Image (cartoon, rainbow, N blue to C red):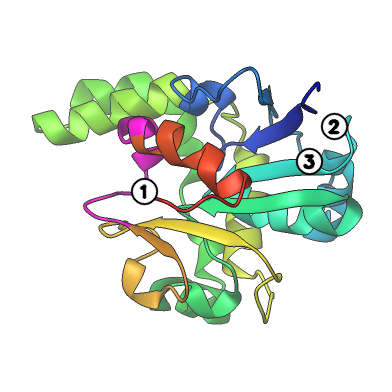
């Protein structure tokens, strides 16, 4: 008996390319993976309208949606327009209540409008003048995986994160979160699968865990 292939769509983090999933390998006999790249937002586009446009990139029914960071927020919004088998978010949030205090404050004060998003156009300069191996390595990482060095996109995306208004989790959402995530601190998370020592970029540096466990999560099998 032929087993139906499960189509799995991945959405990367803010301004990142699908290269962040380069080490993710799911068994080809069971799964077909598809990588979604970012669309540029239309002027003052609502996140729901943007998600509707992103959902047109999904070409199958009953799919698995997996999103990282801001991509996790977007796949939740996309799921409202699609038939979804599984909804999985990584290094992300399920509601506005899981956002850290600094982001809640940025929403109240509109401080997100002051973020220097133009820095993404000067990665070479940042690498040249960055101090310390850790900082330089991080900038090089951003340079490798950044795919949308567009000021308007970044300003728009930052506003969508800070001003996201989801009150309650979408039922059935699987949330995987790093214990040491500095962007969305773990202490604010409710009902998630915790990766010990995992950071915000664990989809890149902890890919072996995901290769082992994503198939189990999708197929409702118990994690080891």
Q: Which residue is mark 3?
A: 63
| Residue 179: % across, % down | 28, 60
Dividing the picture into quadrants, the one containing residue 167 is: bottom right
Sequence-wise first label, 1 or 2:
2
Q: Nearer the viewer, residue 80 or 113?
A: 80
Q: Nearer the viewer, residue 161 or 88?
A: 88
**Residue beneath the point at 55% across and 25% down:** 26
For marks 1 and 3, give the CA distance. Answer: 25 Å
Q: Which residue is mark 1?
A: 200
In the image, which is nearer the foreground, mark 3 or mark 2?
3
Q: Which residues are magenta?
A: 195-208
| Residue 222: % across, % down | 47, 53
Q: Which residue is mark 2?
A: 57
Sequence-wise first label, 1 or 3:
3
- CB of mark 1 within 8 Å of CB of mark 3? no
Q: Is residue 132 visible?
A: yes
**Residue beneath the point at 34% across and 66% down:** 185
Sequence-wise first label, 3 or 2:
2
In the image as oriented, which residue stretches furthest toward the left? 132
Dividing the picture into quadrants, the one containing residue 207 is: top left
Q: Is residue 200 magenta?
A: yes
């Amino acid at each position: 008996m032929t087993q139906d292939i499960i189509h799995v769509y991945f959405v990367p983090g803010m301004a990142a390319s699908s290269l962040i999933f380069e080490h993710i390998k799911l068994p080809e006999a069971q799964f077909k993976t598809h990588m979604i790249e970012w669309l540029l937002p239309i002027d003052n586009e609502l996140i729901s309208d943007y998600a509707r446009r992103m959902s047109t990139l999904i070409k199958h029914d009953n799919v698995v949606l997996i999103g990282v960071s801001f991509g996790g927020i977007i796949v939740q919004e996309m799921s409202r327009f699609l038939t979804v088998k599984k909804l999985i978010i990584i290094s992300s949030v399920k509601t506005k209540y899981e956002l850290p205090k600094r982001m809640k404050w940025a929403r109240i004060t509109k401080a997100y409008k002051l973020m220097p998003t133009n820095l993404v156009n000067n990665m070479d300069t940042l690498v040249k003048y960055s101090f310390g191996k850790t900082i330089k390595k991080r900038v090089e990482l951003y340079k490798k995986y950044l795919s949308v060095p567009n000021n308007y996109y970044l300003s728009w995306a930052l506003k969508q994160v800070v001003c996201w208004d989801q009150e309650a989790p979408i039922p059935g959402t699987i949330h995987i979160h790093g214990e040491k995530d500095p962007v969305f601190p773990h202490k604010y998370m409710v009902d998630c699968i915790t990766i010990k020592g995992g950071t915000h970029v664990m989809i890149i540096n902890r890919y072996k865990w995901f290769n082992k466990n994503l198939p189990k999560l999708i197929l409702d099998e118990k994690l080891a």
